[in-house]
Image (cartoon, grey):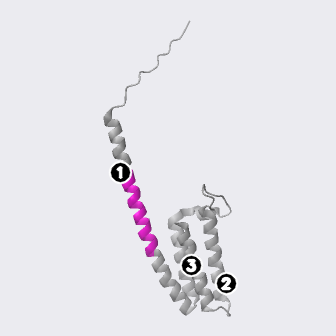
Amino acid sequence: MSIRIDTPHQVPASNLDSQSSLDRSNEFSGILTQTQQIQRIELQSFLSRLGTQGKKLSQTLTLRDLKDFRDMVKSFLRSTFGQSRKMQDESSWDSQGRPKVMARIAKIDHALDELGKQLLDQQAKPLEILTKIDEIRGLIVDLFA
């Protein structure tokens, strides 16, 4: 006994399908552009607030201002990258040879810890603290570069 399997007949794609596909592609590009603009605006706003908090910290050198600064950075990272911060030991490279975000977030956490140690040290100088604040700001900007 033999079994016969019919192959389905292919219906040629209509111009309407290709046109709707083009429309969807344009719509996606527009949404992607809008999302990138919103991210850029949010990053600029955050960096402005971070700069203000950093200046305040460098002037007062109080533990409360340090906590506010740390919380601001950690909150931004949490909202931006979610719970991916927990995977810090994963070190890999992207297609362009740069380390992935996980390694950079670990660097930011390390820089925040160093900042706390410097502030707690009675010998800490405001210039060193400003340098560390700028380093943290630069690492955050580097995440989006």
Crowdedness of circle 2 by 10 Å Cα count: few (<14), some, many (20+)? few
Give the mark nearer the N terminus: 2 vs 1: 1
Which residue appears at 60% of the width and 86% of the height? 129
Q: Are marks 2 and 1 in contact (CB under 8 Å)?
A: no
Q: Is residue 44 magenta?
A: yes
The quadrant the N terminus occupies is top right
Q: In this view, does 59 lie above or below 79?
A: below
Magenta: main secondary structure equals: helix
Image point 41% across, 60% down: which residue? 35
In the rendering, which numbered label is found on residue 117?
2
| Image x and y of residue 86, in percent | 62, 64
What secondary structure is found at the residue carrying circle 3? Answer: helix
Q: Tell me the amino acid under the disc marked 1.
A: Glu
Q: Quadrant of residue 142?
A: bottom right
Marks 3 and 1, the one that precedes in the sequence: 1
Q: Give the range drawn in magenta.
A: 26-45
Instruction: Name the residue carrying label 1.
Output: 27
Q: Mark 3 points at which residue?
A: 70
Measured as percent of width and height from the top left, residue 29 is found at 39, 53
Q: What residue type is labelled 3?
A: Arg
Query: Furthest-left residue in view?
Result: 16
Q: Determine contact: label 3, label 2, CB under 8 Å.
A: no
Q: Distance between the residues labelled 3 and 1?
A: 39 Å
